[in-house]
Amino acid sequence: MTRLAARVLPPSVTVALLLAAWIAVTSTGSVPVYVIPSPRAVAAALVTNWGDTLASATWLTLAETCAGIGLGVAVAVAMVIASGYLSVIGTALTPLLVASQAIPTIVIGPLLTIVLGYGMSPKVIVVALLCFFPVALNLMAGIRDVDRRLIDTMRTLHAGWSALLWRVRIPAAAPRGFAGLRICVTFAPVAAVFAEYTGSTNGIGYLMLQAIPRLATDFVFAQVIVLTLMSGLLLGAVTLLERLICPWNSPEGHS
């Protein structure tokens, strides 16, 4: 079995088995359609609503998600670089780093909506808060855990602190940062949808709030599928970006 087949075949079989189980459950008629709709009904809802409302809502949620990821990563990288030059910055900001995760999103979302309104800003900030912590924490851990032999070798070459930071510490920590980024991008679309619950006029979260009271479960399932695909695409994009920026950390780089 080739490497590509080994990667593609197991998840494909899993999806096929889940789809078969879904069809089997819904075809018996023992479960009401407003609880678990059939795959055909979900596909019909996806196609019917895509051109009218779902497409624009999807693009808006995707834009909020990407902007939030970008903001969270930018702030995390800036903080880690600043703490690399001045360690007291990292020490001072670590409590804020923890506090950003201690406050529940269910509290932050409505407060941001009250302050910033119903636009994209509250959703972007909620996603940024979600992404900031795992990326910053992994980068800081990666910088601290750099192989001492690399640092000693650079110092024998009279490398200064900036050279150590940019040529050794950051490249060594980058794979750890991408590990944190892979974690947060899978949850980022869900965070954007939750932020839309607290106040919005468009987006997948807004459409879900409209569909649930009407028991339009097929449309809700269609939106869940869109969110799942969105998370998968974002994860694939991050994996590709990591291979471009950190080629030494890819399986091909280790071989």
Image (tube, grey):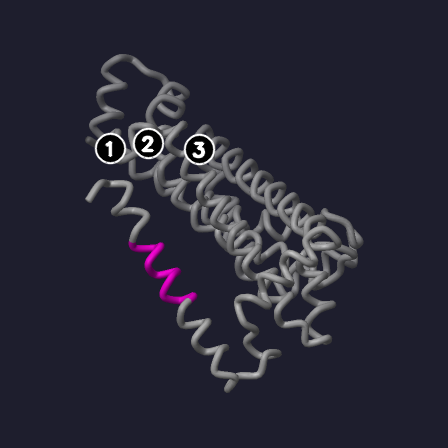
- Residue 165 drawn at (x, y percent): 39, 25
| Residue identified by numbered label 2 | 172
Q: Residue furthest top?
A: 157
Which structural element holds mark 3?
A: helix
Q: Are marks 1 and 2 in contact (CB under 8 Å)?
A: yes
Which structural element holds mark 1?
A: loop
Q: Give residue 241's mark.
A: 3
Q: Quadrant of the C terminus?
A: top left
Q: Residue furthest bottom?
A: 30
Nearer to me, 161 or 115: 115
Marks 1 and 3, the one that precedes in the sequence: 1
Marks 1 and 2, the one that precedes in the sequence: 1
- Relative side of 178 to 41, left or right: left
Marks 2 and 3, the one that precedes in the sequence: 2
* Foreground tag (1 vs 2): 2
Q: Which residues are magenta?
A: 10-19
Q: Give residue 147's mark.
A: 1
Instruction: Calculate the distance from the C-alpha at mark 1 to the C-alpha at mark 2.
Output: 9 Å
Which structural element holds mark 2?
A: helix
- Residue 57 drawn at (x, y percent): 70, 52
Nearer to me, 63 or 214: 214
Instruction: Calculate the distance from the C-alpha at mark 2 to the C-alpha at mark 3.
Output: 16 Å
Q: Examine the image and state in which quarter residue 38 appears.
A: bottom right
Q: Give residue 9's mark.
A: none
Seen in the picture, residue 214 relative to 107 is either above or below; the reply is: below
